[in-house]
Amino acid sequence: MTGTLLVLGASADQLFMIETARAMGLHVVAIDRNPDSPGFARANESAVVSTRDVPALVELADSLRAKGHRLLGVTTMGSDIPDVVAALAAHLGTPGPSTESARLATDKYAMKCRFRERGIPIPWFERIERAAELHAAVAARGLPLVLKPLDSSGSRGVFLLEPGCDLDALFARSIAYSRIGACLVEEYLPGPQISTETVLWRGRGVTPGFADRNYELLDRFRPQFMENGGWVPSTLDTAERQAVEDLVVRASLALDITDGVTKGDVVMTDEGPKMIELAARLSGGDFCESLVPLGTGVNYVEAAIRIAIGDTPDLDALTPRFERCVANRYFFVEPGRLRRIGGAESLRGEPWLAKLAFWYAAGDTIPPTRSHAERFGVFVVVGRNRDEVQARIDEVYRRVEIVVDRVAESRGVSAAGSGVGVAPTA
């Protein structure tokens, strides 16, 4: 039997990794607690196990070995579980993040403390566990500030604190997303925000993933931070991009990640780039699956897999082969019961549309959008420049019609009329 790779997660976020690993000739076992995960159909084998249940994962790995599998490694993308990857890799004796690096990467306060110790430029920050501590921080620092759970991801519970906001209510909403019952309040840094993904090997880092984050919906979702996709290539100039790349490599090494991948969130301020946070994993969504491959011709998920199985990645192969403008955007829909989606099929034949996907079907109940997890769908478009791509983004929003029967929450019955929500300004 060929070597086996364990992929933690089999949702849409892990499909590209599963497909890449199989194209590399690996035998892929996809693991997810959801028996209907789409990745199960793409993998060689599947297992219905929670990707956070380390004892169950260890038991699964041991049973696979007993059946003759040569387990080469374990990895994931889009799931913020470096601690689980570290524990399972240690059991298997395969490459993976250290327990300490995983701890730092999943505790935003510990991460910021390490960055401060190592001289990584970051915003002011403070750990809080009670609303009174938030009030004290606001009194001392003033507004605006940013509030976020200490140990969550996917924009869950991340709020912009501005004059007039209800601090107690926002604190209660934010801390509800923390498993350990703590939040981080930090300085709000205005400026362009950048998403990065870096591949590290023996302390050398290359950053093929580099995109401008799109926050055009900030007013619509305020005070919630809700990103609406991104752009490749970035509008930063060569010197600014190099400064960001140098920073994310330094930040990765500050967390003692010398072999692996990191996902960075950076703000370009008047004083230069500053780290917001760093994850010890690849992103989900379309960053490494669509934006970078379509925009540069580089698939760095393969390099991440090679590191996970103990092979040497070719960092020189991560140099862009070409430059094309690419953007991804999301559909955000008002809550209710989905009646229908119109216009999608006529769009699918457009040569500039690289992806169009919806995560709900007619009859499904659409929940309120409180984080990235509740987005309705996604699309990816390509073009020669930003003007052309923006025109195509507008065309997708114009042609897709999503009809939702709104539900009166207090009575649990359909409200009069229906809502259509597709465009960013809807």
Image (cartoon, grey):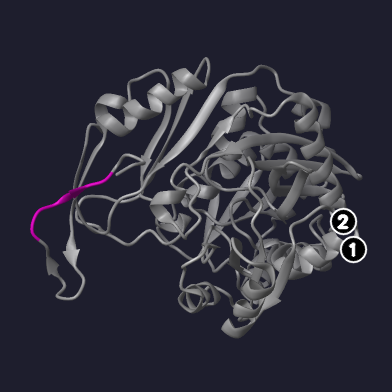
Image marks 2 and 1: residues in contact by CB distance under 8 Å: yes
The answer to whether any part of residue 117 appears in the image is: yes
Say which mark, if any, is on residue 35: none
Which residue lies under the disc numbered 1? 117
Q: Which residue is mark 2?
A: 254
Highlighted magenta segment, given as a residue range: 416-421
Q: Nearer the viewer, residue 274 or 358?
A: 274
Q: SS of the residue at dot 1?
A: helix
Image quadrant occupied by the C terminus: top left
Q: Please determine whether, in this image, residue 394 is positioned above or below residue 310.
A: above
Mark closest to the chain's N terminus, 2 or 1: 1
- Residue 352 placed where, x, y %? 42, 20
For disc 2, the neighbor class at 10 Å (few under 14, some 14 to 19, many from 20) is many
In this rendered view, identify the residue nearer to me: 138 or 38.
138
Residue at left offset 52%, top offset 62% = 162
Q: Taking the image as drawn, is residue 309 in sight?
A: no
Q: Is residue 417 magenta?
A: yes
